[in-house]
Each structure stands twice: as structure tokens, then as C-alpha cells.
Amino acid sequence: FSMSMRNKIKSIIERLIHPPYNFLLIGMLLGEKTHIPPELKDVFIESGIMHILAVSGLHVGIIAAALFIFLNSLRLPKRTKMILVVLILIMYASITGFRPSVVRATIMFSLLVTGKLINRNRNLYISLFLAAFLILLINPLILYDAGFLLSFIVTFFIIYLSPILQELFSNTITWIKNPLSVSMAAWLGIFPLSAYFFSKVSLISVISNIFIVPLTAIAVILGFIIFFLGLISIPLATLIAKINYFVLMLITFLAKLFSSLPFSFVYVAQPLIIFIFLP
């Protein structure tokens, strides 16, 4: 079933959106980057937004938020909504091939929802630890996987540093302060990992993500709308696809703009792995 759904999503997106933007959208929805031109991948790495093509907690959060908005319109009981969202996220994790970042985000979300249902305090650190423990219990060798390390280390930095940075930017407007704090915390977490795995570090990602992440949310939501409409009405799906085409063009334009700025990224020597885990 999961493979069938995955292939159907790819088929509809490839049919309705012209390349390379169809491949970008498939990367955003499924994490599959095989057909994205190498030069475009480099642009996304240099502008610090490669994570939008990696299917991560960002994507799980976007899907969960969209589902809650939709289910709220149906006036379902709170417990029913939460259970439905968890089940759909598990199905999404299956469709993406149970990528570490998606599994991590789904487990954390499920634990937080369970805590809310039984009226227990929700601790993000415990949820993160349990997610890592469960994944390693199933596959211990995944500890050496780049996606696993990126997902958990960056998430830890966001949980730990975001509140501190929000205090630091307390005099800043809220709609700037919150995304700036998250973006900077994520950058501090990803900096050593990017140096180790890519020998290249983006210096512009704190700014680029503030602009591109909201557009990514729009592209992902429209992408799934295209898929579901494509199952029942190609003309309707085509209309939404045309809108998303321009969203994807804008994301690409901004990525190229940020990557072209002076000192937007630097090449670095690969650090020893031990330095990644030093405080």
C-alpha cells in the first residue's frame, strides 16, 4: 500500500508540474532527490535550505497543522482529531520509507499527544530521548546515519536554544523573533554536521529559512491537495498545480539569490567526528 501511494503521488506530480519543479516537489513530499539536477542541489545546500528536500520534522509539523485545521472544520471530538492525526502521520512515515527524521517527529508527536490525552505534562527532552531510544532499539546501526544525526542533534538545539534566543530577542516583533530564534538554533546545530558531511557551511541560512520555510509549507500543502484532487479531477488538480508551480519557482529564485550573495557559504575542512558532540 505504501509503495503504491508513493508511486501514485510521484506519477501525479510528474504529470502536472514541469521539471525541475516537479522533482523539487517530490523531494519536499517524499524526500526523494534522485532526479533533482546536481547544480540545483548545490544551490539549496549553499543557501542553507537543503533540509526542505529531506522530509523532516518540518514537513511532519506542516502536515499535522494542516490536518488539525481541516479536522477542526469537521467539529470532531478533540480525542478523535488527535488519534486521526497520529494515524495519518504514521501512514505518511510509511510512505516516505520510515526516514529517521520523519519517524523521530512522528514518535515525538505521538508521545506528546498521548500525554495530552491522559493529562500528563509533556516534556520535549523525554520525547526526543524516547524517540531516539526506540529507533536505535529497532536499528542500532542507524546511529551512523547522517539523517539520524542531523534530525536529533538539530531538534535538540531547537528545543534547548530557542527559548534562550527568544529571551535575547525579547524586544523584537513576535512574528520575527520566533522564526529567527528557531532558525538560528537550527543553524548552530547543523553547522558542525554540515562541515563534517558536506565540507561546506551556509552562512546565510538563518535569513534564508525565514523567507523560504513559509513558502515550503505552502508548497507541501498544495502538493498534497494536487495529489488528492488528481485522484478525482485532473482539471482541478492542474489548476492547483499551476499555482504551486509559481510557489516552487519563487523558492528556487530565492535559493539562487541567497546562494549568490558574497560569503553566503564557505568551504571548510572536515572536522573530526568527536568535535560534533562537544558542547
Image (cartoon, rainbow, N blue to C red):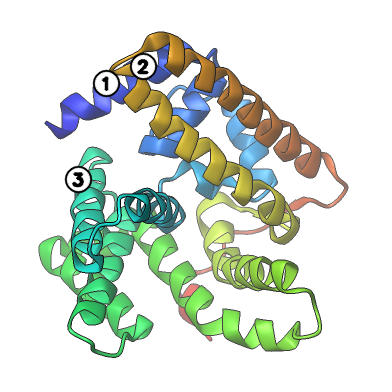
Residue 251: x, y in percent?
A: 66, 36
For the question of whether residue 273 can be seen, the reply is no
Q: Is residue 247 above or below residue 204?
A: above
Asked which quadrant contains residue 247, the reply is top right
Cα–Cα span, label 2 and label 3: 19 Å
Label 1 belongs to which residue? 8
Q: Please, what secondary structure does the residue beneath circle 2 have?
A: helix
Instruction: Identify the mark at residue 12; answer none if there is no mark.
Output: 2
In what quadrant of the picture does the N terminus appear?
top left
Give the mark nearest the N terminus, 2 or 3. 2
| Front one among 106 and 150 | 106
Mark 3 neighbour class, 10 Å CA radius: few under 14, some 14 to 19, many 20 or more: some
Q: Amino acid at mark 1?
A: Lys
Q: Nearer the viewer, residue 203 or 235?
A: 235
Residue 64, label in figure:
none
Local SS, label 3: helix
Q: Is residue 110 above or below residue 156?
A: above
Instruction: Report the number of numbered marks.
Output: 3
Residue 46, horizontal then vertical, whole percent: 68, 45
Measure the alpha-carbon separation of dots 1 and 2. Answer: 6 Å
What residue lies at 25% left-to-right and 59% top-to-bottom?
Answer: 81
Please determine whether, in this image, residue 148 is positioned above or below residue 24.
below
Disc 1 element: helix
The answer to which of 28 and 152 lies nearer the viewer is 28
Amino acid marked by disc 2:
Ile
Q: Position of residue 176 (x, y in %)?
A: 74, 67
Q: Looking at the picture, which amino acid does disc 3 mark?
A: Met
Q: Left of 61 or right of it: where is 215?
A: right
Dot 3 corresponds to which residue? 91
